[in-house]
Image (spheres, rainbow, N blue to C red):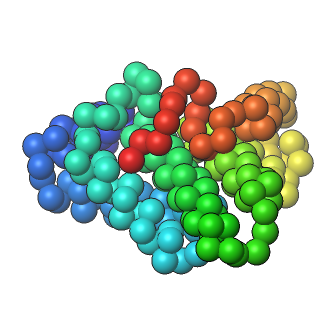
Amino acid sequence: METPQRWDRRMQQRLARGEAAALGELYDRFASLVHGTALRVLEDERAADLVTREVFGYAWENPDAYDPREDGSLRAWIARLARRQSVHRLRQNGARALEEGGSGSAEELEQRVRRAAVAARADYIVTAMPAPLRRALESAYFQRRDYRQTAAHLGVTEAEARRRLRLGLQLLSTAHTGPLDGSPPGSGGNPL
């Protein structure tokens, strides 16, 4: 079986060669991640569809923009693109609504963007964190297991389950300190 890093590298090479089948495979693997992220941020099905098309269009046209040394896995890169573009579109749509005399204020829009950016950054952190930490958090928070039950579920010691949960929570605690575009630390600007 191919390792994730090898699959990522091969996928990037196939996209760079212009293989349409590669784009289809990338879409099949990550479309629900991108669309779900956009839908959570934008709360609008059509806007989420548009962001999904934009993200995969960007990946198709710019496969060399992905750098595994800086971006981590291809999944994390795609997730980051989705979050950043969703937050960008939320800000853009909100500003347009304000210009057209819609309800709300610039402060309310900025608060909504901030909440969406924090949620997007938390999603990105979970997506990008090592699988053992992600599985521990999912077990504890989505399946509502305590650390003992999480340890049994994952087949690790209770001390290891506590360590994974603590590290995962420490990573998540940084979600409130990131930039407003939903991007990870060290990245800048709108990717699309």
Left or right of 128 on screen, residue 59:
left
Question: Which image quarter: residue 67?
Answer: top left
Question: Which image quarter: residue 29?
Answer: bottom left
Left or right of 88 on screen, residue 26:
left
Tell me the residue at 38%/55% (across/down).
Answer: 55
Q: How many marks?
A: 0
The picture places residue 52, in percent across and down from the top left corner, at 42, 63
- Considering only vertical position in the picture, is 120 above or below 105? above
The picture places residue 160, in percent across and down from the top left corner, at 77, 29
Tell me the residue at 62%/67% (across/down).
Answer: 99
Left or right of 146 on screen, residue 187:
left
Q: Nearer the viewer, residue 162 or 54?
A: 54
Q: Is any atom of residue 32 visible in this view?
A: no
The picture places residue 75, in percent across and down from the top left corner, at 44, 45
Tell me the residue at 85%/53% (across/down).
Answer: 145
Q: Nearer the viewer, residue 60 or 97?
A: 97
Quarter that holds the N terminus: top left
Q: Is any atom of residue 51 visible in this view?
A: yes
The picture places residue 53, in percent across and down from the top left corner, at 36, 64
Q: Nearer the viewer, residue 121 or 98?
A: 98
Question: Which image quarter: residue 122?
Answer: top right
Tell me the residue at 50%/71% (across/down).
Answer: 47
Left or right of 30 on screen, residue 110:
right
